[in-house]
Image (tube, rainbow, N blue to C red):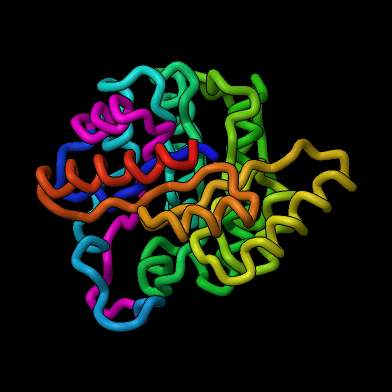
Amino acid sequence: MRFGLSIFATDTTMPPGDLGRLAEQRGFASLFLPEHTHIPVDHAPYPAGGELPEKYKRSLDPFVALAAVAGATTTLRLGFGICLLVQRDPLITAKAVASLDWISGGRVDFGIGAGWDRPEIEHHGTPFDRRFKVMRERTEAMRALWTQEEASFDGEFVSFAPSWSWPKPVQDPLPVYIGGNLDQSVERVLRYGDHYLPNRKKGLAERIETLRTRAEERGRPRPDVTYFGAVADPEEIEFLASADVDQALIMLPTAPAGEVEEAVDHAAEVAARFR
């Protein structure tokens, strides 16, 4: 099993470049950052219950933060956990993803999701009940821009005439990880993604088995499964290994630099037992 890190990087935590450098030094494979463009005051109920944590309101833009990480590292994978694609223009986002992959020498793992906060999503003009259709169309349109010299797309939510867009990603294909914890997530990975990025343990092993079986039946390459937000606890890591997870992303606290560094060292100690 591979080990990476995840964190809600904010204006109160260790700078992303410093954290990336530390993660690489400690032997981690990747650093994944989440995204929230903003949090409406009248936001939807927090899925985990209780008050919405402050870190959601203060998270850095992942493209800017991961560019800083790219400049401070040489091998660390640059992960989105997740990019809220339904809140982003696909032409601009395709350019940004390809540019980050190019400047990093092909190190982007592009995790995407549709989000849960109805007001946040609808502030961007995306109908909440159609957000998964929007996510699919935007992903397919971005793939066209990444892989075709003259790309076009004609969908319900995305439409553009034949166009040029460079740079192209270094990776071919650039890996798209689909987030989600329901059975529908499996079909989304197989329909327009490459790999799977869950963050809930309930039913995980069964979904992974279904995903791998259906991929084999359809002649697809074996999907990678990266689990977002793992706890640095041996029992949890053992569970993820038994579920056939390929990479565990250990969640760091959104805290000052000293506390984050201690958490990275602890995570490295736990990871060392399973390498």
Question: For this rendering, which residue is in front, 265 or 119?
Answer: 265
Residue 44, position as x, y percentages in the image:
36, 79
Q: Specify whether 2 is left or right of 51.
A: right
Q: Is residue 94 above or below residue 101?
A: below
Q: Specify whether 181 is left or right of 255.
A: right
Residue 204 is covered by the magenta coloring: no
Q: Is residue 219 above or below residue 182?
A: above
Residue 39 is covered by the magenta coloring: yes
Which residue appears at 29% of the width and 25% of the height? 25
Which residue appears at 19% of the width and 66% of the height? 54
Question: For this rendering, which residue is in front, 178 or 262?
Answer: 262
Q: Residue furthest front?
A: 273
Q: Specify whether 102 is left or right of 208.
A: left
Q: Is residue 250 above or below residue 95?
A: below
Q: Is residue 96 visible?
A: no
Residue 148 image-quadrant placement: top right
The quarter of the picture where the N terminus appears is top right
Question: For this rendering, which residue is in front, 225 or 264?
Answer: 264
Q: In the rendered picture of this protein, how many numbered marks are placed on residues?
A: 0
Residue 19, position as x, y percentages in the image:
23, 35
Q: Is residue 45 above or below residue 228?
A: below
Which residue appears at 41% of the width and 77% of the height? 47
Residue 134, position as x, y percentages in the image:
59, 58
Residue 156, position as x, y percentages in the image:
66, 57
Q: Specify whether 267 is left or right of 11.
A: right
Which residue appears at 60% of the width and 62% of the height? 132
The stretch of residues the image draws in magenta is 17-45
Q: Is residue 141 visible?
A: yes
